[in-house]
Amino acid sequence: MSVRFRIRTPAGQELSFATLDVFENFVRSGDLSPDDLVYDAEDGSWSPARTHPMVLEIEYQEEDASAASEPDEPSPVETEAQDPSFGLSLAPEQPGPGDDVTERAGESDGSLDEESPADPAAASASEGALELDLAPAVEVSEEEATRAFVQRMEAEREASLDYGERSGVQGFSMDDSSTLGDMLTPSPPPPARARPERTPAPRPDPAKRTASETSRPEPRSGAAKTGTTGKTAKTSTAAGRSGGGGFSRFLMLVVGLGVVGAGGYFGYQSVQSVEDAETERAAPVEPLPVAPEPEPEPTREPVIAQTESAIRERAQERFLTSTQSALRDLPPIPETWATGPYFSVPSDYPDVLDAWERYLTTIRSVQAGETDRYVVAYDRALDDAAIAQNEWATRRAAALEGFGASEAERSAHYDRVEALAAAAIRSHEALVESEGLILFEPGSGSGGGSGMGADVYGRDEEADLLLAQVVELLSVSLDGGGLGPGDGVNVRSWVWDGFLDAATR
């Protein structure tokens, strides 16, 4: 169901009404405050209740209905005019707050002219006989009566909002407060206001009302309206008090919730602080960590003598062992190498080429890393002798000088091995290119009889020349100036033996 009317109070509460009938009942109940905002879905606008057209129309209808159902009763002024006893007073009436003394005096004079006796002497004689002061009947205008009534209603409304000693939040002020801390700020109680005496509103003579006075004034929601009856004024007063009472209860509820919440929060913080302090006191105090002093290096017993000759001898042993491990993977040269079948069809023996390439790669690697291998071997020898670390650098430099003394012999042996491997690889490539031009005939006695190249010959002179060059190159490389292996079968052992001999000289 759609909502047509909405009401929003200054405190932020919102009420919704689906139909006009429900909204009219709420307006007539007196719970609507003039400061409340009213929303009408038909025009989509918000306006205060005191100026909202629908609220004013409902109040006018209520006033008209009340005036039609209530019989006309004489007002206090008319009663005084009819009963001569009410025309007597012991003292002249003092003007009330907001009354225009000049205007009231003028009006009073007019009323006396109409109702007082024509003979002044008779009036004086009557006064002397009664020995009383006659107070003239005061006729109050409708405008003055309305102003006095409005002032009285405002004073009553302020009195209903003044909590005084009966309030549970005495000493606190809500003025200009936007937070709970501001709401709880102590402030002095407002000064007591004098409540004006209630003066009955006179009912003017309908015959004297002018056209402007009989026109309907703009009513005020929740307050007295000009030209209304006494019953309507009482209803408006009750509505104002009801609205003020609801706001007071809401204000007290908000302040009470704020005080309870603040008390709970601060109580929890206090308990938590005490618990934290007790926990800190109960917690064991851990000593600050102290870095332990470095332990002295354990004294080691030397494995070998600490003499330089013993250290170099142990380093030489380790160096040779590491070199032998690097040469251990060299394959033996195939027995078919440099034979008649190999010379005639070398492509049938690819393992021959792989073996010589392996020799060439390994010998170059061993030669390039021999210095590093010796340094590692010498450092381990120093450790075996339990030499102090601060002496290693000096001892190592001296040992490298002695190791360099045999470098020439080792390099010569490396060169012989590399030359033999390179000659075998070049010969293999040349024979593969001339394959088919060199023939092998067992028992033919060609090629010098026995030895390398026996029973092998070239198909032509050029092939014979190539075969002769290959045989000569391989023979010189195997001899190595008297230091070579001599034949292919001894190549693998020759590589290690020649290195051992050169390193230990």
Image (cartoon, rainbow, N blue to C red):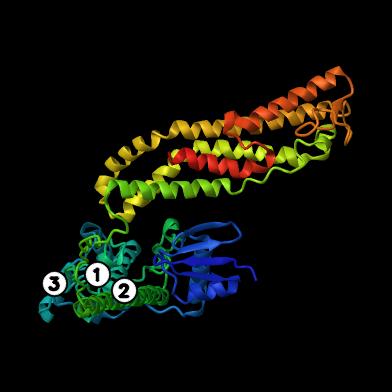
Residue 393 placement: quadrant: top left
Q: Which mark is residue 124?
A: 3
Residue 294 image point, x, y percent: 22, 60
| Callout 3: SS | helix
Q: Which mark is residue 11?
A: none
Q: CA distance from mark 1 to mark 2?
A: 9 Å
Instruction: Residue type at mark 2: give it.
Output: Gly
Query: Is 468 above or below relative to 253?
Result: above
| Callout 1: SS | loop
Relative to residue 80, is residue 315 drawn left or right?
right
* x 79%, y 28%: residue: 448
Closer to the chain start, of discs 3 and 1, is 3
| Callout 2: SS | helix
Is label 3 or label 2 in front?
2
* Foreground pick, 416 / 472: 472
Closer to the chain start, of discs 3 and 2, is 3
Residue at which label 1 appears: 184
Q: Are marks 1 and 2 in contact (CB under 8 Å)?
A: yes
Residue 187 image point, x, y percent: 18, 67
- Residue 438 visible in the displayed image: yes
Residue 196 image point, x, y percent: 22, 71
* x 85%, y 28%: residue: 446
Residue at which label 2 appears: 258
* Foreground pick, 337 / 165: 337
Sort mark 3 into few (<14), some (14-19) or many (20+) by Cα contacts within 10 Å: few
Quadrant of the rendering where the C terminus is positioned: top left
